[in-house]
Image (spheres, rainbow, N blue to C red):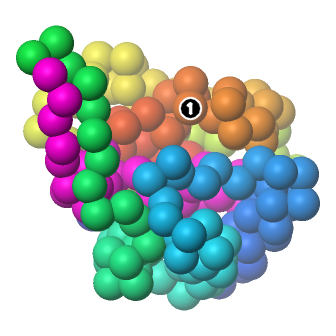
Amino acid sequence: MFEFKDLDPATRLEMVAAINEAQSTGNIYESARFNQAGRDQWLTLLLEAAESHDEHWLAFQLEAKAMMKDFEGANTPSGDTRSSTFRTLRHRRWPMVNSIGSISLAFCRKARATGHTHLVVYRAQAVTEPRPESQALVGTTMSIDGIETQLKDTKLSFKSPLVKPNSGLSVRLS
């Protein structure tokens, strides 16, 4: 589980604003694993998670409301395999892509409003074997402009070290 520092009601409001801005510019990521219910309800649940809950609540809602395809196929060298989408979802922690992104953008907004230009990277989730590239970022600062550039564009956001699977990283005010 993630432990986000400084995630107060004001920051949650900024998360909602960041999500709404992303939605208005067409930059909300919708998984190819969604079924029609998922496509219809994703934004509402993402906003509710930002307002009042966490990534576990969001993942539970996706499963409880049957918003994902039951199974997905994958082509492998040994042939076609099927895996449970929900098992994959939990393993890859996919809801965190949007959650970490919106939290990071919320802190950018908060930092800018208080005259800060940079945020500090920290480990928000304990990992047993941190990747060297994510470990190297812990304690460093990132410019608000750089974070926003990485995260405001859906395609670029997948390359951001802040949202890479299992990095466990987030940002906070210094």
Residue 125 seen from this side: no
Residue 79 seen from this side: yes
Q: Please, what is the three-letter code of the amino acid marked with disc 1?
A: Phe
Q: Is residue 139 above or below residue 55?
A: above
In the image, which residues are magenta? 79-107
SS state under label 1: loop
Query: Mark 1: few, some, or many residues within 10 Å (few <14, many ≥20)?
Result: some
* Residue for badge 1: 158
Q: Is residue 88 magenta?
A: yes
Quadrant for the N terminus, please: bottom left
Q: Is residue 147 left or right of residue 139?
A: right
What secondary structure is the stretch in magenta mostly built from?
A: helix
**Residue shown at the point (73%, 73%) measured from the top left:** 16
User: Residue 62 at x, y = what percent?
Assistant: 40, 74
**Residue shown at the point (77%, 42%) measured from the top left:** 152
Which of these two is toward me, 174 or 63?
Answer: 63
Which of these two is toward me, 151 or 26?
Answer: 26
Q: Quadrant of residue 85?
A: bottom left
Q: Is residue 4 above or below residue 100?
A: below
User: Residue 39 at x, y = what percent?
Assistant: 61, 67
Q: Is residue 39 magenta?
A: no
Q: Is residue 140 left or right of residue 13?
A: left
